[in-house]
Structure formats: C-alpha cells, structure tokens
Amino acid sequence: MTSDVSPAPRTSKSRVLSGMRPTGALHLGHYHGALKNWVRLQDDYDCFYFVADWHALTTHYEEREVMERYVYDMVIDWVAAGLDPERCTIFLQSRLAEHAELFTLLAMGTPLGWLERVPTYKDQIEKLKDRDLATYGFLGYPLLQAADILIYKAAYVPVGEDQASHVELTREVARRFNHLYGKVPGFDLKVQAALAKLGKDDARYFEKQRKAFQEGGSQEAVGKAEFILKKATANPEWTADDEELLLGHLRGTGKNILSEPQALHTEVTKLPGLDGAKMSKSYGNAIAMREEPAVVTDKMRKMPTDPARVRRTDPGNPERCPVWQFHQVYSDQPTKDWAWKGCTTAGIGCLDCKQPVIDAVLKEQQPWRERAEPYLTNPKHVHWIVEVGTERARSVARSTMKDVRAAMGLNY
Ligand code: TRP
Ligand code: SF4
C-alpha cells in the first residue's frame, strides 16, 4: 500500500480529489481527521471536493427528508473550515450524471469478485446489521467511487486508511480500462497542438531530446526535455493535460485515457469522542464544529476522565483518560507537561485539567462560526458555491467522457 506519499511539488498543479458522504453538520473528528488536510492541500494542488450524496444513499437510501439539509450543512462546514471556493472546486455528485455514466460503463468489464473482495464490503454488512445492505448499489459502492476519481483524472486522493482498498480498486479498474481500450484517441494530433504551445525553438529542442532518449535511452535527454516542460508552465495557455501528453510522447508510452490515482494518507490527527470511543454523531459523543460555546463547555466539563481517579486527592493515569487525548491535539508541550504532572501527582483537579482544552476548542471554533454566519443567514450563497463548482467539474467530466465513449466505440 502506498502510505505517506509525499508528492513532488509541481508548478502545474496536480489534481487532488476527495469526497465525503453528507452526514449533516460535521464534528471535530471530521475536522481533524480529514477536513483540516483538505484545507491545507488547496494551496498546492488543483483540488476537487465533492459531496458524495449517492454514496450516502447506498446505505441510507430511505432518508430523503434529511439529505438536502445534510448536504448544505456539510458544505457550510467546509467553507467555515477554510475551503475557499475561489481556490478549489466544490460540487455535488448527484448533479453530475457523468459519474453515473462512467460507473455504468466501468461496470461492464469489472469482475464481480473484485467488488466482493473489497474488505469494507463484508465489514460494513457486519457492522450495519440493522440495514439491508444486500443491494446491488451497495456492492457497487467502490466502483462508483472509482468513477468519481477517474472521471477527473485525479493524481492524488486524500482518504483515510479505511478507504485505501477503494483507491487500490480504482487503480485496477483504470489499468484494465487502459488495457482494454488503449490510448486517447487523436493522441498524435493532441501532441502536435501541445508542441505548438512550446514555440518553435523549444518544440524542436524537445523533439531532439525525445529522439535521443528513444534511440539511445539517454536519461540526460529526458531531463533536458522535462526542463522545457517546466519552462512551459509560464505560458498561461499551458495545461496539466499538455504536460501529461508530452510526457507520454517523450517516453513513448502514449497517454492513457484514465490515469491511476494514488492514495494520499497524510498524517491525520486522531481525535476521539468525549468518551474516548470514535467520535460519531450517532454515539452521542461528538462536538459539532459549530456547536454553541456554552454547550461545548458543558459537554467537556461532563466528559469522563480516568475512571480510577474518583476523588480529587487520587492521582490519575492520563493514558486512561480521553481528556489526555484532547491535550495531544490541542495543547502545547508545557501545557501537556503541566497536565501530566498535575494528574499523576493529584496536583490538579480534572476540571482544572480540562480548562485549557476547553479554551483551545472554543478558540479554534471561533473563526468557523464567523465564516459560517453569512451562509446561514443567506443559504443562497451556499447554493451558489455548489452551482459554480458543479459547472466547473462538469466541463472536466464531460471531456473525459468524450474520450471514454470514443475509446469504447460509443461515438456513433
Ligand atoms: N467513500 C468515501 C468515504 O466514505 C467517500 C467518497 C466517495 C470518496 N467517492 C469518493 C472519497 C472519491 C474519495 C474519492 O469517505
Ligand atoms: Fe484526565 Fe486530566 Fe483528570 Fe488526569 S487530571 S484524569 S488527565 S482530566
């Protein structure tokens, strides 16, 4: 498995794509486990983030009353956390029928066994015993995810470890597709167009290096040719697609129709729920990102601590206390040292110990509440963000589908 991939920074930004199922307002676990990372990535990548509402329906297909609210509450939290609709593309899966089309076409050649063997399939059926997941849609869950990823030719997919097998399946599906249906139609013409953007001299130089590489295997020539491509990024007309085309041209590999993505498992911060179990709305142990300060304070003051520390005078063991795990996320070293020492020597009480964490959580939430405010008073703003993002995504999805249809002989 590819873990801790640290992609080389590139001038023409690589695409990152990720999605979340709409579960309504997000909590601190979502923020620290995923969203914080999404916000960071938007500086360095061409980020596409979407609401996976069809994926939510694979398990919760009867919940039509809440879906709309869940979708927009979640998008508000994204923006509140710092996703900037000017810098990244935020959209809604169900508005892009192209995803469903690619899903259908990929389904034709995907062996049933590939889907039955995805570990999350049996896991989830076991875990969600109260639901009937013996459905065609649920079996197809990872293939729909593959379509989400492949349709945008994403280079990187930031996901949790639990989703690694889905990205792996996506890679297999892409490989099989490229094997069955080959290269982008009109590859040579597209190469010519990209070469033209380099300008005469650079194009000629590039071609010379390509020959040197293909005839004599010169790595130096590859380096020189790649330098030309790097230089080209200064041209506003130059696109990541051009770069990919010419890299394929340079190495003689052509340009595949679908590209294999890589999972991006960046270090995530694990914030447990108030009781130390996984934070989840359904366990009642969550703090929402935009929870009222008074409620946050109350919840945290009531948070269970080391069960062995019954009286104030009993020393405690932070390792057995969920508050200590909050300190790991929210406190600096001196505060952590203070809490550890105070706990193990009974020098401080549990409420003392919680106070810096409470303060830090409230401080973290403050800008979220402020940024969310205008969207809460005028929901049209959120709809608009999703509208604009969806159209941006659509133009990419459409162009991939054109190639896919042609490759499969469906352009009649
Ligand atoms: N399955 C993902 C999850 O539950 C959500 C998802 C759907 C996704 N499609 C995706 C994530 C594509 C990354 C890329 O978290
Ligand atoms: Fe937990 Fe802090 Fe109380 Fe120790 S003092 S039990 S770490 S809350």
Image (cartoon, rainbow, N blue to C red):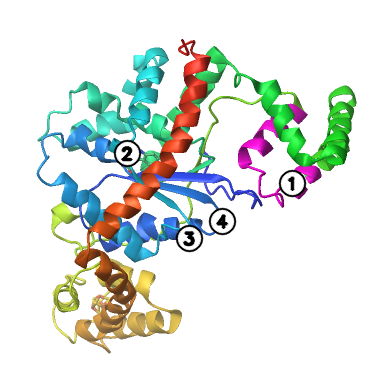
Q: Eyeballing the image, is 154 above or below 399? A: below
Residue 205, horizontal then vertical, whole percent: 88, 37
Q: Is mark 3 within 8 Å of ligand 1?
A: no
Q: Amino acid at mark 2?
A: Gln
Q: CA distance from mark 3 to mark 4?
A: 8 Å
Tell me what residue is drawn at x 26 percent, y 88 percent.
348
Please tell me whether residue 242 belongs to the stretch shown in magenta. Answer: yes
Q: CA distance from mark 2 to mark 4?
A: 24 Å
Q: CA distance from mark 1 to mark 4?
A: 18 Å
Boundaries of the magenta span:
227-250
Residue 388, horizontal then vertical, whole percent: 38, 49
Q: Which mark is residue 232?
A: 1
Q: Residues within 10 Å of mark 2 (few under 14, many from 20)?
A: many
Q: Eyeballing the image, is 75 above or below 250? A: below
Of residues 26 and 172, the one nearer the viewer is: 26
Residue under pointer 2: 93
Please tell me whether residue 290 belongs to the stretch shown in magenta. Answer: no
Q: Is mark 1 within 8 Å of ligand 1?
A: no
Q: Amino acid at mark 3?
A: Arg
Query: SS at mark 2?
Result: helix
Q: Residues within 10 Å of mark 1 (few under 14, many from 20)?
A: many
Residue 236, horizontal then vertical, whole percent: 66, 50
**In the picture provided, is 289 more to the left or to the right than 217?**
left
